[in-house]
Image (cartoon, grey):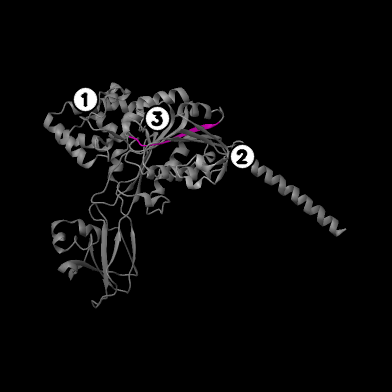
Amino acid sequence: MKTMLLQKKLNNLFRLFLALFILVSAGVALAETKWEVAVVFRGAEPDEAFQKDIDDNILELARIQSSSQLKLGIYRETLNGSVVYLPGTGTAKNSLGNLLYRQDLNSIVIPGSLKKYEQENLAPFLKSFFKSKDSKKALVIYSHGKGAQGLQGLSTRELKDTLTSSVPHLDVLWFDACFMANFEFLYELRTFSDYTLASEEAEFSSGLPFQTLSALPSFSSAKEASVALAKNFIESYSYLKNGQQRNYVSVSSATVSVVENKKLESVAAALKKVSSIFKSLNDKTKTELKNYLSRTASMDEKELVDLGRLLIELRKKTNNADAELTALIRLLNIESVKKLKTNPRLHIAVPAPGAKIVYGFNNWTTGDEQDFGKTDLFRQLLKNDDFIAGPNKMNWPVKTIQGDELVLSPFAPSLNTFNYYFLSSEGKLLTKALSATRTHDVVESPADTAASPLLYTAYTQQAGIKAERYTGFNIVLPGSVPSMDYFELEFNQLAQWLSL
């Protein structure tokens, strides 16, 4: 009898657990949002290293499980045409070698629908992919980019025509390519999506961390999804945050911007006034400003400069108190970005009570007693007690430390390596010479006004001879002639930014 009663209780508990499980599962399903995500890999001609980076990105995407909440499509251009792969659709088994440049993986079989075409097939792919009226829609285009000139082999006007004929209105459009947070380009394509993600500087061919696209169903808001994707992108290139793609970082910073496209109109109208101010300058002032921007604010593509830096320097150069120019700088949240500094905080263990730290910078070439006499910078970083003879037969600052840990932020523009060693209170050497080098840190700037089109912008700080500054958009340097197509772009027609 007891056994029967116990079994009955267990059965009731099981039913209760099952009911709760179904309710919870249903709740999770209801909380998720359907997304259709198309990823386009353009570039059949670039070199082998570029093709292998595309392979790695496709392999990353192949690990994403398509579901009722996430429809994923991959398009890749090849030298012989193009390939379309829809993972998780149908029961067919396909060789991975049909999708990849690397043929050593052709023995791997993947499920889903895969079709090869003997020609480029971008517009038909996009037109056939986005079908559901109930789904949010995201399009990622991976390619080489050149700002206002568009993507490699596809000018801005041609890309605009392709999107016009083949895609519905998108929630998110991401240009995973160099220099595409370019104002002229984004203005031309502003009607195709609610939000655009792009980088204003040269991008690394490793591209975005594609597996993060699997998180999209957890976002019902395209705005929240865009910012989350951008944050994940920038942190993946951060050394200090131990980002998964940090080892790709080499010459320049990684940058990303999230643009709310409907707010670009007011900025474009304001830039018409900026164009007028620049053209009113005399030739000498124009040349000085252009030379300064080329040296301090240009991208790796030298005809493109940071828009924020241009506006700030124009106001300085002209001593122009124009209210519209000032309002534009504030609207783009530029001044606050300009004031941000990346200075990693160091926690240094002190080897003995009352130990003395002897320190300098840049491999014991900077920060000696003579440098202290030239500037207050070094005293601001760490106020010393005295100087002592040390490396390179120079006198270096020394400070007695109370406590078992020293916490400081010793870096500044041009000061990227902090060198130090410890002496006992009696002057005996306690440690060998040590050093800490500033690596890449993340500078973030969310919009501080609802009117700003820059919803979020961020970059990794490059450790180099100077601190870098990015404010979210690049723009063609006035006086440049990037291409004849430029003069037909809507922004140039409005603002007359460049003229023949």
Q: Which residue is mark 3?
A: 261
Q: Which residue is mark 1?
A: 276
Can residue 211 be seen?
no
Q: Main secondary structure of the magenta part?
A: strand
Secondary structure of the residue carrying tag 3 is helix
95 part of magenta stretch = no
- Report how far apart the C-alphas of labels 1 and 2 lie in the structure: 54 Å
- Outermost residue on the right side: it is 1
Residue extent of the magenta highlight: 135-145
Secondary structure of the residue carrying tag 1 is helix
- Residue 413, position in %: x, y? 24, 51
Residue under circle 2? Answer: 29
Residue at 82% in and 52% down: 8
Element type where label 2 sits in the image: helix
Which label's residue is closer to the chain start, 3 or 1? 3
Whether 139 is among the magenta residues is yes
